[in-house]
Amino acid sequence: MVKDTRLYDMLHVSTDADESQIKKAYRASALKYHPDKVKNVKDEVARRKSTEIFQEMTRAYEILSDKHRRLEYDNYGDDASKSSSVTETSQAFSQPGQNMFSQAEMIFNNLFGDDLRGGFGGRRGIRVPGGASSFFQNPFPSFGFGGDFANGGDDFMMGGISGMSQNQNQQQQQRRKGRDIRHTLYCGVADFYNGRKIMLSLARKVICPKCHGLGGLKEVNCKGCGGSGVQVSESRTGGMYQRSSMTCNLCGGAGKYIPDDCICPECHGAQLKDKKEILEVVIPRGVSPGYNVVFDKGADEGLDIIPGDVIITIQEDNKMKDFVRHGDDLLTTVKIPLCKAICGGMVAIRHLNGKTLNVYLGRSEIKSGTDVKVIKNRGMPITTNEPGMSREVIGYGDLYVKFEVVLPQPGELDERQYEQIGTALLPDAEVPDIDGSTTEDVVYTSEVTSGSIPDPNSFP
């Protein structure tokens, strides 16, 4: 429910009108009441009345086109919107009438500057009816702006309007981006192979939805400076007049403050509040370690900043050793018993995709503990990686399997089995008869610390 519809009625729009409808209505009304339309009217009162209507319409547009000020107006009426009016433009000049008109004219020109040339005879500066020219006269004639600020200073005013527009654009472009939030997520090789969705919880700062970052539900003009943010003192000594200004010490130059009874109950005046977000991190199949999942503008919000990004970097968990990734290939080690290495047979390998691969080994095919077999097209998925396109699997790398032969442990075989193995495997060559004087019985120890083990590459 809108508390006050006066500004909507002034522009002849409904209370639910969107921004484009408000702009269109303002354009039609402003062109009708623009001072140049009544410049030939002899009645000075009528001209002033038209100018006042033009200013009020511009103010209505200025409030209703700003979502924060429009919300404040809808909730609290015209008094609240007046207390939060922008005063920056009015502080640039010294005469009140000139301030109001200049601000309205600058807003109008920024929106419809090109239309002025055809609608008002091609004059692009501020034009005021002749009878009111003294009211808007240049207060600084000695600076070379011309005797009539409104009619004779077109170039100055258009330069000011253009400069103001450029400054506004620069301010928008110079809005700094907030810091990014970075997090590293460790995943196993299986997650890189199959893809995975992981839910993460993130605590971030957001602009308070209750007060929209104002810190309160209503702002009022500072009583110390009247909303200008500047305190002015005047003194007269003899025939000398002195005027000085300083930043208001009550509001710190803001020009406004939030009464205690209007402080936002949700953020308690902090303007920001904590919010818990649940992020769904999608890891596509086949991506490499270092892959980034970016949540655009998902970091902390702030006043007059662009939120940074949340960047989740996916890295491989090296603690999982069943499979090792080597580019697009996979490496794994499979242990087989001695009998399987000698007699051959089927070896089952549990793959990352959940399936079991049956690998057949021939008799005595495994000759050492470093034999490696290659299984084609059972490695990592190979996917497309074109920007803006979904990833599609276009192939697979290879699977490299190293077989380790596991010898029987002491006590696993009885004497008869040892004799049978010895008979089957013992070569026919006999041990040579060695002179006892050149032999020595030694005892070795099995307790060897890891630090004393030589480099395996050092063995002959």
Image: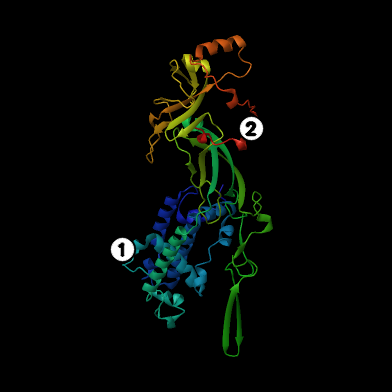
How far apart are the alpha carbons under marks 1 and 2?
99 Å
User: Residue 314 location in percent, x, y?
Assistant: 51, 39
Hey, what amino acid is under mark 2?
Val
Q: Is residue 349 visible?
A: yes
The amino acid type of the residue labelled 1 equals Gly
Q: Residue at x 66, y 52 (%)?
A: 268
Mark 1 sits on what residue? 118
- The label shown at residue 448 is 2
Q: Few, some or many C-alpha atoms within 10 Å of disc 2 (few <14, some 14-19, many ≥20)?
A: few
**Residue at far bottom of view:** 238
Q: Which numbered disc flags the more N-terminal residue, 1 or 2?
A: 1
Neighbor class of circle 1 (other Cα within 10 Å; few <14, some 14-19, many 20+) is few
Q: Nearer the viewer, residue 98 or 282?
A: 282
**Residue 123 falls in image quadrant:** bottom left
Quarter of the image for residue 245 reads bottom right
Q: Position of residue 363 (x, y in %)?
A: 44, 15
Disc 2 secondary structure class? loop
Instruction: Using residue 184 as the reference point, say whether residue 141 is left or right of it.
Output: left
Q: Is residue 455 above or below residue 95?
A: above
